[in-house]
Image: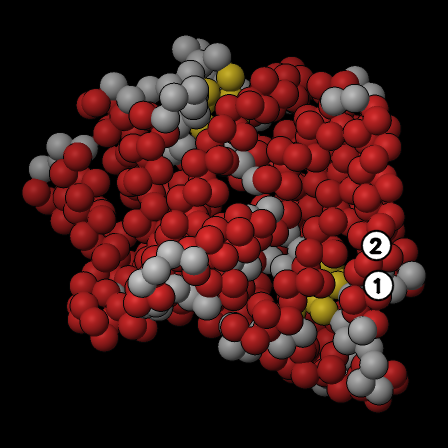
Amino acid sequence: MENWFSYIISLGAAVMMPIIFTLLGLLLRIKPGKALLSGLYVGVGFVGLSVVTGLLTSALGPALETVVGVYDLQLGIFDMGWPAAASVAYNTAVGAFIIPVCLAINVLMLLTRTTRTVNIDLWNYWHFAFLGSIVYFTTDNLALGFSAAIFCYMLTLIMADRTAEDFQKYYDGMEGISIPQPFCQGFVPFAVVVNKLLDFIPGFSKLDIDAEGMKKKFGILGEPLFLGVIVGCGIGLLARYDVKDILVLGVKMGAVMELIPRITRLFIDGLIPISDATKKMISSKFGDKVKLHIGMSPALVIGHPTTLVVSLLLIPVVLLLSVVLPGNKFLPLASLAGMFYLFPVVLPITKGNVVKTFIIGLVALVCGLYFVTNIADAFTMAANSVAALHPEDASVRIPEGFSAGAALDFASSLMCWVWYHVFVGNKFFAFAAGLLMAYLLVWNRKKSEK
C-alpha cells in the first residue's frame, strides 16, 4: 500500500490532475478533447506554479540564510520545510493508508449528506497523515493516530462546506469549488475573531483598502510587482549583498509577484468547463436542491493581489518576530514560500482588505510559531524514525547543531495543534471530541439542507 500510494503521489499534481480532470470530464459527458484540454490546463498550472515557487525558494532562501548568519539569528528548531513534513507523513503506518481511508470517509459523508464536498485534492491529504503520524509517535497508539487524522479530515470537509459560498462569491471563476485543506481552514477562526474585533475600533473602517485601492492610492508603490522588487532589494541589503546581487534578487522577487497571478489563471481556464458541466448534470438529475462542491487545492487562488501583497510584507516581519518573541525556538526559512497558502479562505472574510488581512496573518503566524515550537518534539520523533527507515531521504534528516526539526505547514495551523493535544491528552478529551464531531456532522447536514 505504501509503495503504491507513494508512486501515485510521486507523479505529482502536474501528471495526476490532467488524468483526474479528463476522467471527471468524461463522466460529466464533456467531449473527450475538451475534457483533456481542461485537465491539461490544470496540470500546466501546477507545473508553472512549481517553477515560480522554485524561483522564490532558490532566490530568497540563500539570502535569508545569509541574513541569519550575518546577524546570528539562529534558533534551536531547524525549518525542514513542507516537503519534509509530507515525506514524514506518508512514510508512516498512518500515512500508508491515509488516502483510501479518507476517500472512504468522504464517500460515507456524501452518502449521509453530512458534506457536499468531493475532495479530489489528493496531494494535500498529507496534512491529515502528518497529524495522525505525530499523534501515533507520541502515544504509540495507531488507533489514536488514525482517529486524529480522520477527525481532522471530517472537520475540514465541514469547514470547506461552510466557507464554500463566500469563497465562490469572492473569487471569479470558482463556482462549484471549495477548499478542503486543513492548513487554510485552520486560520478561519483567527480571521473571524480578529475581523470582528477590528470592526469595533473607531475609525478603522477608513482603512478599508483592497489591492486595487492600493494601486489607485499609491500608484506604482501599490503594485505587487514593484513591492516584490522593493522587498527583494531590502532583503539583499540586509544580507550585505553587492549592488548587482541586490538588483537581481529584487527583480526575481518582482517576477514571482507578477507571474503567480498569470499562472493561476490557467487553473480557472481548466476548471470552468468542469464546473459548468457539474452544475448542469446535478441540476438535471436532482434539480436545484442539491449542490456539490469539488474540493481543490488553494493553489487555485494564491495569485490574488491581496494575498501576494500581504504575504510579501509578512516575510520580513515574521522573520524578525521569530527572533524576538520570548519562548519561540523556530525560525521559519524554508517554510516562508508557503506563506501564500495562509490566505485563500481569509480574504472572503476580510473582503480583501489589505490592512485587516495583514493583521490577521500576523496574529495567526505569531500563534503559529508557538504551535510549531510546542509540537516540534513530536515532529522530530517521527522524522528520526522515518530517517532510520529511509536513510537515502536527506530531506527528513535534522542537521547537526539543532535540537529538533519542524515546518510551518501544517504544524502552525490551529487545526493541527488542537487535534494533536486532544488525542495525546486525557482519553476523555478524545471521547468528548467524538461527541462534538457527531454534533457537527448533524449540524452541517441541517445547514446544507436549509
Callout 2 crowding tier (Cα within 10 Å): few <14, some 14–19, many ≥20? many
Task: Using the rendered image of the protein, determine whether residue 36 is visible from the camera's viewpoint.
Answer: no
Q: Which amino acid does label 1 sit on?
A: Arg
- Identify the residue at horizontal 43%, vertical 36% (top origin): 366
**Residue 160 drawn at (x, y percent):** 68, 59
State how far apart marks 2 and 1 are (Cα): 6 Å
- Identify the residue at horizontal 91%, vertical 61% (top origin): 112
Q: Which amino acid does label 2 sit on?
A: Leu
**Residue 152 drawn at (x, y percent):** 73, 43
Would residue 127 appear left or right of 80 to someone viewing this image? right
**Residue 110 drawn at (x, y percent):** 86, 62
**Residue 298 drawn at (x, y percent):** 56, 58
Query: Please, is residue 19 above or below residue 85 in the view?
Result: below
- Identify the residue at horizontal 48%, vertical 35% (top origin): 367
Q: Nearer the viewer, residue 140 or 36?
A: 140
- Identify the residue at horizontal 26%, vertical 68% (top origin): 214
Task: Using the rendered image of the protein, determine whether residue 368 is visible from the camera's viewpoint.
Answer: yes
Would residue 100 appear left or right of 311 to someone viewing this image? right
Q: In which quarter of the image is residue 200?
A: bottom left
Query: Please, is residue 390 above or below residue 207 in the view?
Result: above
Which corner quadrant holds the N terminus? Answer: top right
> Which element carries disc 1, helix, strand or loop?
helix
Residue 445 numbered tag: 1
Q: Nearer the viewer, residue 193 or 99?
A: 193
CB atoms at circles 2 and 1 under 8 Å apart? Answer: yes
**Residue where numbered disc 2 is placed:** 441
